[in-house]
Every structure is written in structure tokens, then in C-alpha cells.
Image (cartoon, helix red, strand yellow):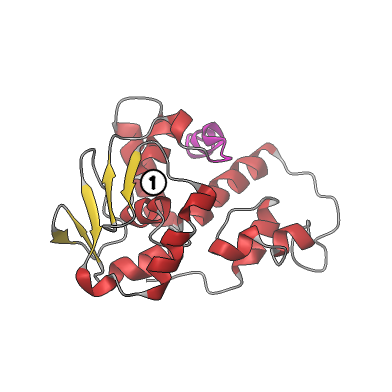
Amino acid sequence: MARYREALCRICRRDGEKLFLKGGRCFTDKCSAERRKYPPGQHGQKRVKLSDYGVQLREKQKVRDMYGTLERQFRRYFSEAERQRGATGEVLLQLLERRLDNVLFRLGFASNRRQARQLVCHGFFTVNGRTVDIASYLVSAGDAVAVKEKGKGIPSIADSLSKVLHRGVPEWLELNSEAMTGKVLHIPSREEIQMPVQEQLIVELYSK
């Protein structure tokens, strides 16, 4: 599968805000988005006024970058959101939040979604007692997530759990750090998805 291989900090600088793509580094003074608050490239410091389409496109790209999805996959999420009841933008964010790699990141088992995706693909986690190695697997309310025995000795998981209090666990999730387990209490509402996202711009972009 295609994937982004360039420097992650360039994405944050391009979007003009911290997307916390590199985990703990984003909370230090080494964060490039803090040190160089302008887009990358030789023309990065020039003022550019975006059109309405450009603003909508930039918002969509930002959400894609946050969750680490490709365009075709992101369009499928949007199509599914359109078919479900409720506000399309809110349902879209709920679908993205329900991804297993995102849930593991929210619970603190990984420092960022990219690391969580790698751990899932290596089969270190179970959902309701069954091994799941698909990062895009959508969890449901009541699902129990746990680290398998072979994964409890992995330093990166233990290190991430020790730092989870720094960013906190969302109210729609429950974490037992000692047992290395988590539970999905309910599907998050828009108020519980604390993301700097204007999802209506994405809806307007795909509605053209």
C-alpha cells in the first residue's frame, strides 16, 4: 500500500498547526511546527491567500494527514457517512475515531497513530479476545481492547502508557493501564472529538 515517506513535521508546517504526528517530540521544544511557523519550501514565508476551494481542500488534507488515510479510503469513509443518519461531517469524524489504530493511540498504547498502525499489523492487540491485525478495523460500543502477552514486554507500549496522563484519555474510552486493557464505552459525540477540524468544509468540498 502507498504511504507517506517524507518528514512528518512538514505536514504540520504546511497545515499551519500542530497535528501531533510524531508523538512525544511534538510536546518538546524540538517541534518544527513551533520553531518554524511557516510552510516548508523556498516560498514558504510568502503570504498566499487561498480560494474557497483551497480552504476546503486544505481542511480535507489536514484530516487525512491526522488519521493517516489515503484519498480512496477517505472517500469511502465519506460515502459511508453520507449513507448513515445524522450530520455527515460528524458521522465522518466518528468513523475515523473508531479506527482501531486511532483507539489505541487515544488509549495511550502508542505515541502516535502511525506507531499504533504498525503494532496492530504485527498482531499485538486483541478486540473482544480475538487477534485483530487490521488497523482500519472499526470498533463498536462495548468492545474490549487488550495487549496480548507477547506485546506487554514491548518498551514502546510501556513508554507510551507512562505518558498517557500528559494528554489524557477521552471520556468515551476507559483505560486500565495496569492490565493493559481498554474499553469503548460509547461512540463519541462531536463534543468529545476534540479536533481542530471544520468538518463542514469537507462536506462542501465533496458535495460539489
Please identify the quadrant where the N terminus is shown: bottom left
Return the x and y of residue 73 as percentages of the image width and height.
37, 54
Return the x and y of residue 184 as percentages of the image width and height.
28, 42
Residue at 56%, 51% in the rendered image: 61
Return the x and y of residue 174 as percentages of the image width and height.
32, 43
Residue at 74%, 58% in the rendered image: 34
Q: What is the quadrant of residue 149 in the picture?
A: bottom left
Position above or below: 108 against 30: above
Q: Identity of the amino acid at label 1?
A: Leu
Looking at the rendered structure, the secondary structure element under dot 1 is: helix
Viewed as shown, does residue 167 lie left or right of 80? right
Residue at 35%, 51% in the rendered image: 103
Segment colored magenta: 195-208
Decide which of 164, 103 is in the foreground and name it. 164
- The residue pinned by badge 1 equals 96
Viewed as shown, does residue 65 lie left or right of 171? right
Q: What is the quadrant of residue 177 in the picture?
A: bottom left
Position above or below: 61 against 206: below
Residue at 70%, 51% in the rendered image: 16
Viewed as shown, does residue 140 lie left or right of 105? left
Decide which of 35, 5 is in the foreground and name it. 35
Q: What is the quadrant of residue 95 in the picture?
A: top left
Q: Per the image, is 203 magenta?
A: yes
Q: Per the image, is 70 magenta?
A: no
